[in-house]
Image: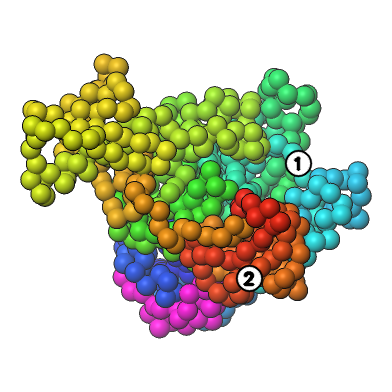
């Protein structure tokens, strides 16, 4: 029997495993980097062992240190979570060689399936050989790992060689394996996967399908189970292929087989061009998936508890439980979808999701979001009898959530779940955000009234501190500005406030933490919380506009500023001050929160300053370089590399 489990991971998945261990009476051990010293997973564990350093290569990817930590803490089993070492066969062997229980598949199965090229060979699928114009577009893909790292879409043959090099370098950095391969790129397919659970006695459970088609940069954003609208024959084929893959390698434990499905919308009568549904095998993930909660909700199981039971040698029942209802999961990220999905950092001042939904997270109110790891804050999961009810339930909970701190994708998630295209299973595909991102990132309605609430709450707070009261001699209107909204108001004889602009707003009450407004006969209450840099009024995040220009914002034309905090990982080969650069030329590369971003020359001109140095950490807004044009008028921007 397992008595103490060390989780060789961090954040949300470590907390998730700890929760099940507590329910089963199993003690827990965390490992942590210096950047995670105060993280939630460290606070929740019964014991914790430091891995000196901050970079993953120094800490969470050091299998020798993790095994030593398990032995030092008296653990008798290791759960790998997902990411990092979870699909590393050498690490699995090191765990068992140390006399510890490995809560995962046999190393041989990991080796057979962790490499996408070898997995394809096992199933008789050949990767694309020499690429020609007729093959385009193609996808360059890392043979190891996942999460979109080491992946590039190639639409022009001339760029293939460069993208192969870039993907290989990124894969080597992320997974310690630079092998890449090329496969056909399916435009606007559906990402569908099958959850497996296998014991050591020959029982294989195929726990239905999941749809993970809503993705940004090839990384999943919204997932659901079961995958809606699949033709019965196609679904049966996916389940059969997944079971066949597991049996071919003697798989034990939890795993997922992923497919890219083309032609499903046409089969369901969509207005798009017709076609025959076809499933392309992508890979088998030999670990627990981020999206495993939707399967748990539909089947009423705890996959972590079952992983532990299988690791202890227990047999699964012959058949899994029957599925019930529908579940949808949304990944809440600290990122700005309107600015190229740029990751965000800072203090998560307040975090609470109301309603009958499940929240899996590695953060609590007051925690700091740093630059070293993935920007996912939480997964919010809703289960209901039907898909329509689950979507509505999840959108409502997210809309009412308190997520105070850095910019997040919360509004995007709410808009996505309510979008008519997503509501129609026949329209589901991986191109959803490419088609709809502009509309989905439009500010939510009511921002001007939230700004009014913020201004009046601030006024009420000032009066509470310094004393207030109506003055018989009226002065000019009070003015407060938040983003694009300029608010004008004045105190009234009765001790309240009159809003001058925007028009049509009646103030019913105003306190430092709550303002009630009436607009067009409809009354609404805004809960207002002010922090040093932002104000949150209802679901709206507002930044006060300063009355005077900050001298630090006065930059010379052509200044390239860091769009996010991160690390300079590369400067273009041979780039020096005085060089001529062309518009759109990549000048340097930043890495932050598992994402790589290229900073481009915004216009053709001369590089007059270069402050970026590989290995240097920079804060958001830091001056990286200056490109001066003859006209001295430049627009600056930073664009993201394909996903990491």
Task: Residue 610: give its label.
Answer: 2
Report the span colored magenta.
45-73
Of 478 and 510, the residue lying toward us? 478
Q: Which residue is at 49% across, 51% downward? A: 335
Q: State whether residue 545 appears in this view.
A: yes
Of 550 and 592, the residue lying toward us? 550
In the displayed structure, 343 sits above or below 37; it is above
630 left or right of 68? right
Q: Which residue is mark 1?
A: 186
CB of mark 1 within 8 Å of CB of mark 2? Answer: no
Q: Which mark's residue is nearer the viewer, 1 or 2?
A: 2
Taking the magenta stretch, the answer to whether it contains residue 258 is: no
Say which quarter of the image contains residue 354: top left
In the displayed structure, 378 sits above or below 451; it is below
Residue 284, image x, y percentages: 66, 54
In the displayed structure, 39 sits above or below 222; it is below
Say which quarter of the image contains residue 630: bottom right
445 left or right of 429? left
582 left or right of 92? right
Specify the quadrant that holds the C terminus.
Answer: bottom right
Residue 387, image x, y percentages: 49, 28
Which sits earlier in the primary sequence, circle 1 or circle 2?
1
Q: Which residue is at 36% across, 32% downward? A: 448
Task: Residue 329: give its label.
Answer: none
Q: Residues within 10 Å of mark 2 (few under 14, many from 20)?
A: some
């Amino acid at each position: 029997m397992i008595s103490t489990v060390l989780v060789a991971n961090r954040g949300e998945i470590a907390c998730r495993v700890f929760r099940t261990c507590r329910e089963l009476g199993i003690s827990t051990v965390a490992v942590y980097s210096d950047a995670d010293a105060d993280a939630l997973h460290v606070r929740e564990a019964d014991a914790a062992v430091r891995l000196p350093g901050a970079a993953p290569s120094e800490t969470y990817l050091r299998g020798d240190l993790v095994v030593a930590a398990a032995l030092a803490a008296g653990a008798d089993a290791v759960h790998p979570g997902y990411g990092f070492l979870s699909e590393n066969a050498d690490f699995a062997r090191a765990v068992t060689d140390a006399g510890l229980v490995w809560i995962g598949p046999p190393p041989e199965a990991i080796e057979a399936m962790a490499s996408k090229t070898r997995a394809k060979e096992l199933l008789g699928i050949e990767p694309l050989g020499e690429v020609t114009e007729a093959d385009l577009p193609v996808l360059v893909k890392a043979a190891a790992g996942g999460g979109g790292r080491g992946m590039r879409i190639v639409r022009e043959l001339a760029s293939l060689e460069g993208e192969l090099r870039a993907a290989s370098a990124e894969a080597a950095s992320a997974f310690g394996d630079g092998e890449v391969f090329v496969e056909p790129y399916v435009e606007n397919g559906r990402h569908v996967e099958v959850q497996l659970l296998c014991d050591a006695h020959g029982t294989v459970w195929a726990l239905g399908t999941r749809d993970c088609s809503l993705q940004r940069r090839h990384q999943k954003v919204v997932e659901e189970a079961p995958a809606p609208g699949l033709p019965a024959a196609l679904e049966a084929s996916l389940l059969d292929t997944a079971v066949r893959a597991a049996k071919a390698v003697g798989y034990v434990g939890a795993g997922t087989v992923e497919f890219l499905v083309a032609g499903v919308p046409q089969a369901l009568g969509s207005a798009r061009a017709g076609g025959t549904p076809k499933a392309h095998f992508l890979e088998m993930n030999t670990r627990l998936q981020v999206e495993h909660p939707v399967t748990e909700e539909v089947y009423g199981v705890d996959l972590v508890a079952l992983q532990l039971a299988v690791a202890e040698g227990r047999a699964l029942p012959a058949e899994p439980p029957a599925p019930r209802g529908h579940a949808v999961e949304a990944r809440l990220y600290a990122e700005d979808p309107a600015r190229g999905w740029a990751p965000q950092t800072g203090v998560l001042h307040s975090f609470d999701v109301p309603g009958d939904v499940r929240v899996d997270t590695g953060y609590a109110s007051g925690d700091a979001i740093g630059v070293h790891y993935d920007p996912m804050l939480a997964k919010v999961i809703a289960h209901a009898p039907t898909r329509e009810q689950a979507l509505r339930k999840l959108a409502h909970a997210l809309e009412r959530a308190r997520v105070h701190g850095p910019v997040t994708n919360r509004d995007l998630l709410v808009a996505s779940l309510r979008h008519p295209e997503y509501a129609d299973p026949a329209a589901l595909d991986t191109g959803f955000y490419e088609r709809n991102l502009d509309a989905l990132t439009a500010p939510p309605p009511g921002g001007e009234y939230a700004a009014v609430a913020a201004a009046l709450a601030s006024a009420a707070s000032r009066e509470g501190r310094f004393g207030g009261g109506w003055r018989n001699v009226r002065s000019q209107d009070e003015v407060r500005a938040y983003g694009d909204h300029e608010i004008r108001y004045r105190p009234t004889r009765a001790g309240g406030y009159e809003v001058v602009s925007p028009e049509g707003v009646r103030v019913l009450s105003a306190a430092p933490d709550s303002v009630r407004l009436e607009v067009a006969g409809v009354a609404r209450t805004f809960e207002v919380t002010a922090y040093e840099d932002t104000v949150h009024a209802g679901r709206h995040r507002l930044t006060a506009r300063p009355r005077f220009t900050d001298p630090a914002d006065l930059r010379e034309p052509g200044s390239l500023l860091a769009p996010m905090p991160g690390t300079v990982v590369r400067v273009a080969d041979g780039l020096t001050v005085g060089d001529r650069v062309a518009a759109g030329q990549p000048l340097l590369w930043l890495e932050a929160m598992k994402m790589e971003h290229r900073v481009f020359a915004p216009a053709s001109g001369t590089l007059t300053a270069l402050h970026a140095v590989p290995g240097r950490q920079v804060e958001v807004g830091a001056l990286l370089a200056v490109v001066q044009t003859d006209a001295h008028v430049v627009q600056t921007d930073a664009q993201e590399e394909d996903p990491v």
